[in-house]
Image (cartoon, grey):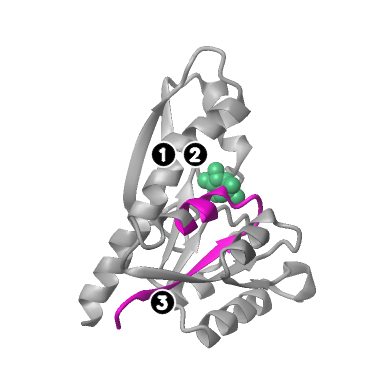
Amino acid sequence: MKQVNVAVLVSGGGTNLQALIDAQGKVIKNGKISLVISNNANAYALQRAKNADIKTAVVLKKEFATQRDFEEKLISILRENDIDLIVLAGFMSILSEYFTSTYKDRIINVHPSLIPSFCGKGFYGLKVHEEALKYGVKVTGATVHFVNEIPDGGKIIMQKAVKIRKGDTPEILQKRVMVQAEWKILPASTELVCKNILKEKN
Ligand code: GAR
């Protein structure tokens, strides 16, 4: 295997997906983003994928009777496309142990806080920054970690700290955490994991 086949799972705007696309061939040399799956048909991330000529798929949870059926559909698409690594980039749906154990050590996620602070069930998107500001922390940041059956509980791959500034709103802080941390450590972690997968296989 020359390059790791990477799928990115998204739900929304897809700025982290964009950071991955922009890093392709630069920071990301050992992986190829070949598929983007969204659980939201209106996600702007789908347009970003199309603009970069990356294959897309939409899988809506409401079209499946159970979580298991939803995850089986995701797995069948991932298998059809020979995916070796799954990157969750703003994917707002918790995956069960069935899914995470099928892709053990092959799923990574970016979370907009320094885990173990402000993470786990219910902590996603802007809510994470609202809680960090409410608590009054002076430093926050982002974490990339492996995904297991515990929400935000897998082994940490990279973290980057970001300082809180006077006058920060959740929106201002979210943007700073993205620019200074997420958009850097997500591509860097993707490359690191791809490199290690290739080392194992060759
Ligand atoms: C990002 O800040 C990401 O870290 C967060 O959602 C945002 C998605 O933005 N993810 C979570 O909160 C997961 N628990 P994007 O669609 O522009 O990449």
For the residue pair 48 and 103, the one nearer the viewer reads as 48
Secondary structure under the numbered disc 2 in the rendered image: helix
Query: Do the numbered discs 2 and 1 sit on residues whose CB atoms are within 8 Å?
Result: yes
Q: Is residue 155 visible?
A: no
- Sequence-wise, which precedes: disc 1 or disc 3? 3
Q: Is residue 103 visible?
A: yes
Image coordinates of residue 38 in percent, x first then y, are 65, 65
Which residue is painted at 26% across and 67% down in the image? 195
- Quadrant showing the N terminus: bottom left
Task: Quickly name the residue at label 2.
Answer: 178
The answer to whether the residue bearing label 2 lies less than 8 angstroms from the nearest atom of ligand 1 is yes
> In the drawing, does residue 197 fall left or right of residue 178?
left
For residue 10, the mark is: none
Image coordinates of residue 102 in percent, x first then y, are 46, 78
Which residue is painted at 37% across and 60% down in the image? 190
Residue neighbourhood size for the residue with mark 1, other residues' Cα within 10 Å, grouped as few (<14), some (14–19), many (≥20) = many
> In the drawing, does residue 87 fall left or right of residue 96?
left
Magenta span: 1-21
Vertical position of residue 80 compared to residue 153: above or below? below
Task: Quickly name the residue at label 3.
Answer: 84
The answer to whether the residue bearing label 3 lies less than 8 angstroms from the nearest atom of ligand 1 is no
Vertical position of residue 142 compared to residue 167: above or below? below
Secondary structure under the numbered disc 3 in the rendered image: loop
Q: The disc labelled 2 sits on which kind of residue?
A: Met
Using the rendered view, name the quadrant where residue 41 is placed. Answer: bottom right
> In the drawing, does residue 183 fall left or right of residue 90?
left
Secondary structure under the numbered disc 1 in the rendered image: helix
Task: Quickly name the residue at label 1.
Answer: 181
For the residue pair 68 and 133, the one nearer the viewer reads as 133
For the residue pair 98 and 2, the one nearer the viewer reads as 2
Image coordinates of residue 108 in percent, x first then y, are 42, 60
Using the rendered view, name the quadrant where residue 77 is placed. Answer: bottom right
